[in-house]
Amino acid sequence: DPLLDFRNVAMQFPNGTVALSGVDLTVKRGEFVTVVGPSGCGKSTLLRIASGLENASEGTATLATKRIGYVFQDATLLPWRTVQSNVELLAELNGQPKKARAAKARAAIDLVGLSGFEQNLPKELSGGMKMRTSLARSFTLDPELFLFDEPFGALDEITRERLGDELLRIFVEQQFAALFITHSVAEAVYLSTRVVVMSGRPGRIVDTFEVPFEHPRD
Ligand code: ADP
Ligand code: ADP
């Protein structure tokens, strides 16, 4: 069963702007679905509806799990907290005991390749490392579904590629479900098992294609 199921979803904001129309979309475990399209076609709106932050004005958006990892373009780290303490934040807000969340955070830090930087402050990190920290934090609640809103958008091309490779490695290993938004077609094709192309105002899905199995990521 899909973890995320959109049926004929439309979104009209109170000011009258229609951001989405007739969107059908499902994401299952083991699927890395990328949504690509120009600025303003409703990608972020789609992701906010997927997360439950926003309600569709038409159709149904069903989320079959509460374990969601949400990663934004802006790494959203607290500047006065170390890497370790930033990664522990969600688990802390969830009431996990100190020892358990510290262990969870260390495993996540290791997963994203940041071991050795636990005690550094965000200002001491490169952009790529800040994003790794943010990524690590999103792993601490064992998400089944990841929602990525242009997570690498603020990074230079080389760092983007490196982080994309890392994310693919983790995906191949863990087989979660992912919905990833980008305006880069190359990034979409490289990362995903399915590419969904959006366009227009209001935004609609104009094309969908599965990425062949014999993909460079193997
Ligand atoms: P994208 O992520 O593809 O750039 P968005 O989902 O951010 O697109 O926006 C889609 C459209 O909806 C845009 O025209 C945007 O101005 C409009 N929009 C987004 N949020 C709101 C809102 N809260 N109220 C009114 N219009 C909005
Ligand atoms: P960038 O640092 O260029 O943004 P990455 O975030 O992909 O690129 O970094 C790759 C790895 O290189 C990091 O996981 C980290 O282990 C190491 N690294 C990055 N910057 C530094 C640094 N300033 N000092 C030591 N190691 C670093």
Image (cartoon, rainbow, N blue to C red):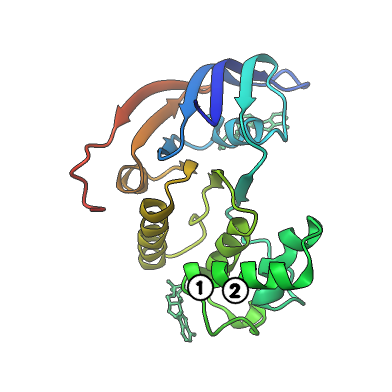
- Residue 56 seen: yes
Determine whether label 2 and label 1 are within 8 Å by CB. Answer: yes
Which of these two is toward me, 161 or 171? Answer: 171
Q: Quadrant of residue 86?
A: bottom right
- Residue 202 seen: no
Residue type indicated by callout 1: Asp
Residue type indicated by callout 2: Arg
Gap between marks 2 and 1 measured at Cα: 6 Å
Tag count: 2
In the shown orientation, is residue 111 left or right of residue 185? right
In the shown orientation, is residue 175 left or right of residue 62? left
Which of these two is toward me, 108 or 132? Answer: 108
Mark 1 Cα within 10 Å, few/some/many (few <14, many 20+)? some
Which of these two is toward me, 64 or 168? Answer: 64
Q: For mark 1, give the secondary structure.
A: helix
Task: From the top left corner, tell me how far across and down residue 64 is, in percent.
Answer: 61, 30
Q: Which residue is mark 2?
A: 106
Q: Name above or below for residue 196 compared with residue 67.
A: above
Q: Name above or below for residue 139 compared with residue 19.
A: below
Q: Which residue is mark 1?
A: 110
